Image: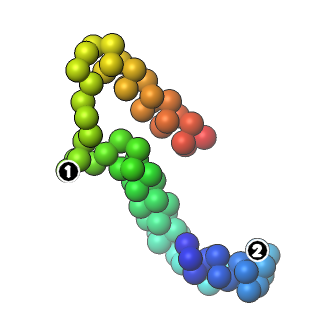
């Protein structure tokens, strides 16, 4: 992604070809890595799931916040 930003700055958007940046698979993998990082920061990870709600209502609220984050994040 940093390489792409540098090329955009130097050549402009129209002057930068995808083949100069990365292949399609590399771009997709970079996007997936970025999404995984955002989700780990927001939700925690398998190593650090964060504090679990103690009540049923707390669990529902937490689940709904995570669902809302996911829906709004992908749109």
Q: Please identify the quarter of the rendering in which residue 9 is found.
A: bottom right
25 relative to 57 in the view: left or right: right
Label 1 neighbour load within 10 Å: few <14, some 14-19, many 20+? few
Q: Is residue 19 visible?
A: no
Q: Nearer the viewer, residue 16 or 67?
A: 67
What is the x, y in percent for residue 37?
Answer: 40, 56
As measured in the structure, the alpha-carbon distance from the residue carrying label 1 to the one carrying label 2 is 39 Å
Q: Secondary structure at mark 1?
A: loop
Question: Looking at the image, is 61 positioned above or below residue 12?
Answer: above
Structure colour scheme: rainbow
Q: Which residue is mark 2?
A: 13
User: Image quadrant for the C terminus?
Assistant: top right
Q: Is residue 30 visible?
A: yes
What is the x, y in percent for residue 65?
Answer: 45, 28
What residue is rendered at 42% in x and 32% in y?
66
Q: Secondary structure at mark 2?
A: loop
**Quick check: marks 1 and 2 in contact, CB under 8 Å?**
no
Question: Looking at the image, is 71 positioned above or below residue 32?
Answer: above
What is the x, y in percent for residue 7?
Answer: 67, 83
Question: Looking at the image, is 37 positioned above or below residue 21?
Answer: above
Mark whose residue sits in front, 1 or 2: 1
What residue is rendered at 36% in x and 41% in y?
43
What is the x, y in percent for residue 8?
Answer: 71, 78
64 relative to 71 in the view: left or right: left
Mark 1 and mark 2 lie on one chain; the one further toward the N terminus is 2
What residue is rendered at 54% in x and 42% in y?
73
The dot on residue 62 is none
What residue is rendered at 39% in x and 20% in y?
61
Question: Looking at the image, is 70 positioned above or below residue 21?
Answer: above
Q: Nearer the viewer, residue 33 or 45?
A: 45
Q: Which residue is mark 1?
A: 47
Q: Please identify the quarter of the rendering in which residue 15 is found.
A: bottom right
């Amino acid at each position: 992604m940093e390489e792409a930003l540098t090329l955009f700055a130097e050549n402009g958007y129209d002057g930068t070809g995808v083949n100069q940046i990365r292949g399609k698979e590399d771009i997709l993998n970079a996007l997936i890595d970025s999404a995984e990082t955002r989700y780990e920061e927001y939700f925690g990870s398998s190593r650090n799931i964060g504090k679990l709600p103690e009540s049923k209502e707390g669990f529902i609220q937490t689940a709904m916040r995570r669902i809302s984050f996911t829906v709004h994040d992908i749109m």
